[in-house]
Image: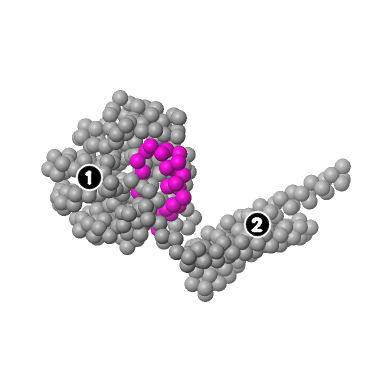
């Protein structure tokens, strides 16, 4: 396998991919909860020949303490039973040296690094060091924040430690407005990462992008159209009572329906004229938007001049609160999502304060010069 990245030495064949024309499917629960839950789920999944790898989170990175933080080592015993009984390959998330050591001890076939770990080069380096001299495939989820270089850097660290069987998992990003997703897919990233690391298999995790069952199909289909090599989909024998990520997990039967509904003929790209017309309309509206933003920015400058002349602070909390209240009311009236409008106005306001700061600094400078 070759790579555009001169620093990356990749294996010629990968355990992460089925190697066939169909996408690789990794399925299994968000979290290991009990031996029964793991085995019931895995036995059902085994019947579906499209699933080749069984996943389960053993240690869960939770935002706040006190939530279910994973079952721990006993879950690795269950994962191993799944492997022995079904012959499925197994995979779990690792976030530190001890996770790596435990997973290797229990014969986990593939490891993955989670989105909250990819953001931290110290943690990724710790994992890479723990894997030195070990021959195991490792998949890396994109970092939570949309920084593609962190993602590439994580692969480089693992590769420098001798790991050549690498994979990427796109699971969406945290952005100011993720709606309707749990994590914004930022679909353009798929093209970018494929260009940066062309030899590395890329999977999509529609479960963490969508955050809800009803969006899984569209997210999976879009990812396949953009050329991903596989899907990782959280699957639980009884999703509604899952101890983590209940709303995004599907049953093995639900997974079967979902996979069957996917159009795998990703070569076929429809481009009807009607779509072109709509795109022309969007292009025109975007140009109008930019022109309006320019006019608004010009008014901000004049406000900056007024504030300077009258010794007023740039940021006026009362005015900002009133503005937000008013814009939210208008947004509501149009039916636009409040979070979306708020995120746009946060950006506009920040820019406006920048413009005012700049104009005040320019006035102050020219005053100082005229005095000197
Ligand atoms: C998971 O796969 O269960 C998980 C925690 O994912 P992420 O790291 O993408 O949040
Ligand atoms: Mn999960």
| Residue 162 % position (x, y) | 35, 27
Query: How far separated are the C-alphas under marks 2 and 1?
Result: 53 Å
Tell me the crowding category of disc 1: few under 14, some 14 to 19, or many 20 or more residues within 10 angstroms, Cα based: some
Secondary structure at numbered mark 2: helix
Q: Which mark, by number, is residue 143? A: none
Circle 2/circle 1 CB separation < 8 Å: no
Disc 2 under 8 Å from ligand 1? The reply is: no
Return the residue at label 1.
Answer: 52
- Left/right of residue 344 with respect to residue 46 in the rendered view: right
| Residue 279 % position (x, y) | 52, 63
Residue at the image point whose x is 36% and y is 27% from the top: 161
Residue 223 visible in rendering: no
Residue at the image point whose x is 82% and y is 48% from the top: 366
- Left/right of residue 30 with respect to residue 122 in the rendered view: left
Which quarter of the picture shows residue 119? Answer: top left
Return the residue at label 2.
Answer: 352
Vertical side of 304 occupied by 21: above or below: above
| Residue 140 % position (x, y) | 36, 40
Tell me the crowding category of disc 2: few under 14, some 14 to 19, or many 20 or more residues within 10 angstroms, Cα based: many
Tell me which segment is drawn in magenta: 181-204
- Left/right of residue 260 with respect to residue 360 in the rendered view: left
Residue 292 colored magenta?
no
Residue at the image point whose x is 35% and y is 59% from the top: 218
Q: Nearer the viewer, residue 156 or 307?
A: 156
Residue lying at the far top of the rendered structure = 133
Residue lying at the far left of the rendered structure = 85
Residue at the image point whose x is 65% and y is 57% from the top: 352
Q: Nearer the viewer, residue 314 or 253?
A: 253
Which quarter of the picture shows residue 269? Answer: bottom left
Secondary structure at numbered mark 1: strand
The quarter of the image holding the C terminus is top right
Vertical side of 164 occupied by 32: above or below: below
């Amino acid at each position: 396998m070759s790579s555009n990245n001169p620093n990356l030495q990749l294996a010629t064949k990968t355990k992460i991919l089925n190697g066939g024309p169909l996408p690789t499917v990794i399925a299994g629960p968000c979290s290991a909860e009990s031996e029964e839950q793991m085995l019931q789920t895995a036995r059902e999944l085994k019947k579906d020949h499209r699933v080749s790898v069984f996943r389960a989170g053993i240690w869960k990175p939770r935002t706040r303490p006190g939530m279910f933080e994973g079952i721990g080592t006993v879950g690795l015993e269950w994962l191993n039973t799944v492997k022995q009984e079904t012959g499925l390959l197994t995979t779990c998330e690792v976030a530190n040296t001890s996770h790596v050591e435990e997973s290797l001890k229990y014969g986990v076939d593939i490891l993955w690094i989670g989105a909250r770990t990819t953001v931290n080069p110290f943690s990724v380096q710790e994992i890479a060091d723990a894997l030195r001299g070990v021959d195991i495939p490792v998949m890396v989820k994109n970092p939570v924040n949309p920084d593609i270089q962190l993602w590439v850097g994580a692969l480089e660290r693992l590769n420098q430690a001798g790991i050549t069987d690498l994979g990427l998992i796109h699971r969406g990003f945290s952005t100011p407005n993720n709606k309707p997703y749990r994590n914004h897919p930022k679909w353009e990233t798929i093209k970018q990462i494929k260009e940066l690391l062309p030899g590395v298999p890329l999977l999509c995790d529609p479960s963490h992008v969508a955050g809800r069952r009803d969006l899984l199909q569209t997210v999976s289909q879009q990812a396949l159209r953009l050329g991903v090599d596989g899907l990782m989909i959280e699957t639980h024998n009884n999703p509604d009572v899952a101890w983590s990520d209940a709303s995004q997990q599907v049953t093995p039967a639900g997974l079967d329906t979902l996979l069957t509904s996917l159009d795998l003929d990703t070569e076929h790209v429809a481009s009807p004229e009607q779509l072109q017309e709509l795109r022309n309309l969007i292009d025109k509206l975007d140009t109008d938007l930019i022109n309006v933003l320019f006019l608004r920015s010009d008014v901000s400058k004049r406000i900056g001049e007024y504030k300077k002349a009258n010794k007023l602070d740039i940021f006026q909390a009362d005015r900002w609160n009133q503005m937000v209240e008013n814009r939210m009311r208008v947004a509501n009236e149009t039916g636009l999502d409040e979070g979306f409008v708020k995120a746009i106005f946060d950006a506009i306001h920040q820019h406006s304060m920048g413009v005012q700061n700049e104009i005040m600094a320019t006035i102050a400078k020219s005053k100082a010069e005229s005095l000197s």
